[in-house]
Image (cartoon, coloured by chain):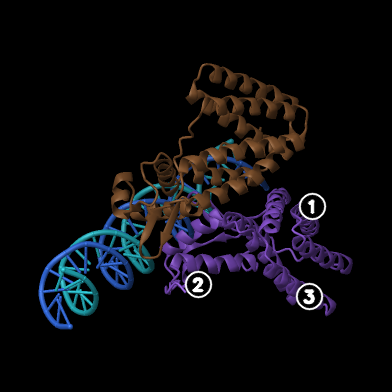
Chain colours: A brown, B purple, C blue, D cyan
Amino acid sequence: MDGSFPIARSSLPEAAAERLRTLIIEGDLAPGARLNERELSERLGVSRTPLREAFRMLAADGLLVQLPNRGAQVVSLSREDARHAFEVMAALEGLSGELAAAHVTDADVTDLRTLQTEMEQAHARRDLPNYYRVNRAIHDRINAIAGNPVLTHTFRTLNARLHALRFRSNLVQAKWDKAVKEHRDMVEALAARNGEKLRDLLVKHLRNKQRAVLETMGEQ
Amino acid sequence: MDGSFPIARSSLPEAAAERLRTLIIEGDLAPGARLNERELSERLGVSRTPLREAFRMLAADGLLVQLPNRGAQVVSLSREDARHAFEVMAALEGLSGELAAAHVTDADVTDLRTLQTEMEQAHARRDLPNYYRVNRAIHDRINAIAGNPVLTHTFRTLNARLHALRFRSNLVQAKWDKAVKEHRDMVEALAARNGEKLRDLLVKHLRNKQRAVLETMGEQ
DNA sequence: GTCTCGCAGATTGCATACAAAATACAACGA
DNA sequence: TCGTTGTATTTTGTATGCAATCTGCGAGAC
């Protein structure tokens, strides 16, 4: 125990940013949409000052772009932008795999196997929401095992930016089956402490995701 | 020509952030220092509102930390933090090398060879300032050739954070000689379009830098 | 002597008012 | 009719004032 009880009283700008982040990712604020400060501040129930600080935070995350004297607008990612983000994320996933294999404990493996079972059950039931939930839990867990907060933060930020694309990956059955299989391989590579293997699996996994996303983006 | 003349009027918050960034990296604002809003706003000649927006930007870059009701303070990186940042940067440098090798043109190679010559001359003259300048130019150039703005931005941000450490790499002659040699190898790997080789060289190069920086950081 | 509590001063947080800039629109002229 | 220019309106940008919170210090209790 460390004896500290940090009450996470988030400030108003942080709360506003969190709310806006959700609105953007859920698509309530569409890509390219201009954000009117007065209107938004009324809708969120905060004044313009904290709202503007929230804008700065989201702009740093790449969810908004701010033009001088012309306010903020929701970022509108081109196909190229998405590709660039995926390229970087693939490199980060690879690192994550190597580090995770180096740091993983037996307890971690046990937990991951449990999650893997849950995932396969969700897959068998064709329970998409739970599949996504567990899927994310597994990836988060691997990232946590890697034990590099800078890596985790960077990855999360890029991921959030891509989610702003609001792609609904058209989960064809074949792809789904394949993804589940890939996850099983990951957990086993981790159990075997095979960093190289895990790296490759994660990079390949992400590349599949990239392909799926870019497909839904169409041409542009 | 595109006929546009975009006057890059940066806003007051941006200008303030830029100024603060310099003050932090140059060490005028020491790690851990608390930033008094009123005092700083007077020194910078702006009011507290744009200053606070600048704080948000720098906090997003990891140069400041903001505590609710307790203002901002210059980040104070632990040895661990630095190690984490370097780990991520190494992965990004590796990616940068692979991409650069895939995209490099003959003109790029010519330019890089020129820079390499400049660097070796600065090295021969023991002209440290110019050595650093050209060194940086070479790395920037490779990064630019990689052609991934997300990568460039992410790398730059992490790099700035490390610069806040204000390490003065104790450039021993042997290490300096080695670094120059490594650069020559990089340019040649790039000329040969050997992505794998360039990746390894860049990762190793960065690892050397990491070692040097962590040495100057002492124990903690 | 040390610890705790409470108060005064200082500092941050937020809202609002005013200034500056951009946008929309109408009137004018080619 | 189309383009341009001037003006009204909207919107963003910045400064400032007040409220909330924190910090430092001294008085009192043990």
3D distance between C-alphas at marks 2 and 1: 35 Å
Residue type highlighted by circle 1: Glu
In this view, A137 is above or below A76: above
Counting residues from the start of the chain, the first of labels 3 and 1 encountered is 3
In this view, B11 is above or below B67: below
Q: Chain of mark 1?
A: B
Residue at x-position 69% and y-position 41%: A94
Question: Which residue position is annotated with label 1?
Answer: B219
**Residue B39 makes an appearance in the image:** no
Question: Which residue position is annotated with label 3?
Answer: B117
Question: Residue B20 — which label?
Answer: none
* Residue A93, x across and y down, in percent: 65, 41
3D distance between C-alphas at marks 3 and 1: 37 Å
Residue type highlighted by circle 2: Arg
* Residue B153, x across and y down, in percent: 58, 58
Counting residues from the start of the chain, the first of labels 3 and 2 encountered is 2
Residue at x-position 63% and y-position 44%: A90
* Residue A194, x across and y down, in percent: 77, 33
